[in-house]
């Protein structure tokens, strides 16, 4: 099967390094691709990007996808020049060591590796344990603390040095589909709505949110600023179609089976119904998941914004979340864009999804 043409906007977002609080590279990509299509474009104090289409429209629809990713923040340099870190976002500590990393510094990127004691040097008890953060370090080949601090600074951040590739067919692997794919989907939706020049009732505000991984912080302030009637958060969701995943505990969702539409208390029932209707009208595949609590996504903050927002959640199925090798099916990405374009176009004036 030939590899699909992958949009430059998506591959550039996937290449951008953007740990929470340090989203500059991803912001620049979003600016370059989305700003030209928007009627108005704003940056805010948290680094969010807010692209507006049809500013006089009603209702106000906010689309949110986060541009931050996991990272490691340097907190201490030992006298021998090894860098210790804290984690930005929810890492699986068992996969941090043995990686190549890139540290973003004032002098440009610095290469390093994450080291820990070799397995041969561990006793039987140590081998069974997941290392603690302080038992892993970043080695940049420095000879001393001074040598290291000439190249990196406390507060610099690192990401895994691995990029996007097609694994097979339409299956792609990347370090941070979570949630560059979501930021792509909401930005691309706005671009296509602008190109279509179809009369939209709604004002559409596509927001590339920051700091989602450390507590949905960008979305919290953006929802106040945008003051939407209706909002859709787009994030990645667990595909549970791999070994060692009990469907009785985690539900049944698959890669390549279309956008996952969430139902539950975080989700406005009318917004869910309209997403479902849009998927059926387009004839695209979709899946439904249930979550009784506030979801672990921007939807959590958005629903509780101001006087309350009719919120939906569209998730892109993904395997191996929060590891350096996240897998998605690119057909699912395209189906998410089509779904949001259809949903935005279906909103009518005065339609606030109150119930
Ligand atoms: Zn995410």
Image (tube, rainbow, N blue to C red):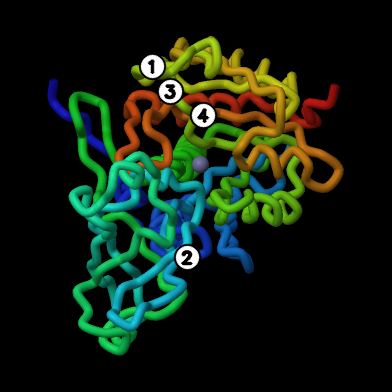
Q: Which residue is mark 3?
A: 239
Q: Please name which of the two marks, 3 or 4, marks the residue nearer to the observer.
A: 3
- The residue depicted at 31 percent of the width and 84 percent of the height is 145
List x then y, in percent, for residue 43. Answer: 58, 64
Instruction: Mark 3 or mark 2: name the one nearer the start of the chain.
Output: 2
Instruction: Mark 4 or mark 1: name the one nearer the start of the chain.
Output: 1
Whether tag 4 and tag 2 are in contact, CB under 8 A, the answer is: no
Q: Which residue is mark 1?
A: 241
**Mark 4 → mark 1, Cα distance in angstroms:** 15 Å
Q: Secondary structure at mark 1?
A: loop
Q: Quadrant of the N terminus?
A: top left
**Residue 240 vs residue 51: left or right?**
left
**Mark 3 → mark 2, Cα distance in angstroms:** 28 Å
**Mark 4 → mark 2, Cα distance in angstroms:** 24 Å
Instruction: Mark 2 or mark 1: name the one nearer the start of the chain.
Output: 2
Q: Please name which of the two marks, 4 or 1, marks the residue nearer to the observer.
A: 1
Q: Is residue 31 visible?
A: no
Instruction: Mark 3 or mark 4: name the one nearer the start of the chain.
Output: 3
Q: Secondary structure at mark 3?
A: loop
List x then y, in percent, for residue 326. Answer: 34, 36
- Image mark for residue 315: 4
Whether tag 4 and tag 1 are in contact, CB under 8 A, the answer is: no
Instruction: Mark 4 or mark 2: name the one nearer the start of the chain.
Output: 2
Asked if residue 14 is positioned above or below residue 232 in the image, the reply reads: below
Instruction: Give the class, few, some or many, for how many residues have Cα within 10 Å of label 3's Cα (few <14, many ≥20).
Output: many
**Mark 2 → mark 1, Cα distance in angstroms:** 33 Å
Instruction: Give the class, few, some or many, for how many residues have Cα within 10 Å of label 2's Cα (few <14, many ≥20).
Output: many
Q: CB at mark 2 closer than 8 A to ligand 1?
A: no
Whether tag 1 and tag 3 are in contact, CB under 8 A, the answer is: yes
Q: Which residue is mark 2?
A: 22
Q: Secondary structure at mark 4?
A: strand
């Amino acid at each position: 099967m030939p590899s699909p043409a992958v949009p430059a906007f998506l591959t550039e977002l996937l290449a951008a390094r953007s740990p929470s609080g340090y989203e500059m590279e991803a912001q620049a990509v979003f600016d370059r691709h989305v700003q030209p299509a928007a009627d108005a474009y704003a940056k805010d104090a948290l680094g969010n990007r807010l692209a507006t289409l049809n500013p006089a429209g009603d209702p106000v629809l906010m689309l949110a996808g986060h541009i931050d990713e996991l990272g490691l923040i340097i907190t201490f340099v030992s006298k021998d020049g090894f860098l210790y870190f804290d984690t930005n976002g929810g890492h699986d500590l068992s996969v941090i060591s043995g990686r190549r990393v890139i540290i973003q510094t004032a002098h440009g990127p610095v290469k390093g590796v994450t080291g820990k004691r070799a397995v041969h040097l561990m006793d039987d008890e140590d081998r069974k344990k997941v290392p603690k953060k302080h038992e892993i370090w970043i080695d940049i080949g420095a000879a001393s603390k001074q040598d290291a601090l000439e190249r990196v600074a406390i507060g610099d951040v690192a990401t895994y040095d691995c990029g996007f590739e097609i694994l097979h067919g339409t299956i792609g692997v990347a370090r941070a589909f979570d949630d560059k794919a979501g930021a792509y989907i909401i930005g691309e939706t706005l671009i296509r709505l602008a190109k279509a020049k179809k009369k939209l009732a709604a004002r559409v505000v596509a927001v590339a949110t920051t700091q989602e991984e450390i507590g949905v912080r960008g979305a919290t302030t953006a929802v106040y600023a945008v003051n939407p009637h209706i909002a859709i958060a787009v994030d990645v969701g667990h595909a549970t179609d791999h070994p060692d995943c009990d469907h009785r505990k985690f539900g049944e969702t698959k890669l390549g089976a279309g956008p996952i539409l969430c139902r539950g208390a975080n989700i406005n029932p009318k917004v869910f119904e309209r997403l479902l209707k849009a998927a059926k009208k387009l004839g695209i595949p979709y899946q439904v998941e249930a979550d009784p609590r506030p979801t672990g996504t921007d939807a959590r903050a958005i629903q509780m914004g101001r006087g309350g927002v009719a919120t939906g959640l569209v998730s892109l199925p993904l395997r191996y979340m929060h590891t350096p090798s996240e897998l998605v099916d690119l057909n699912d990405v395209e189906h998410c864009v089509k779904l949001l374009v259809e949903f935005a176009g279906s909103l009518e004036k005065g339609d606030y999804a109150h119930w």
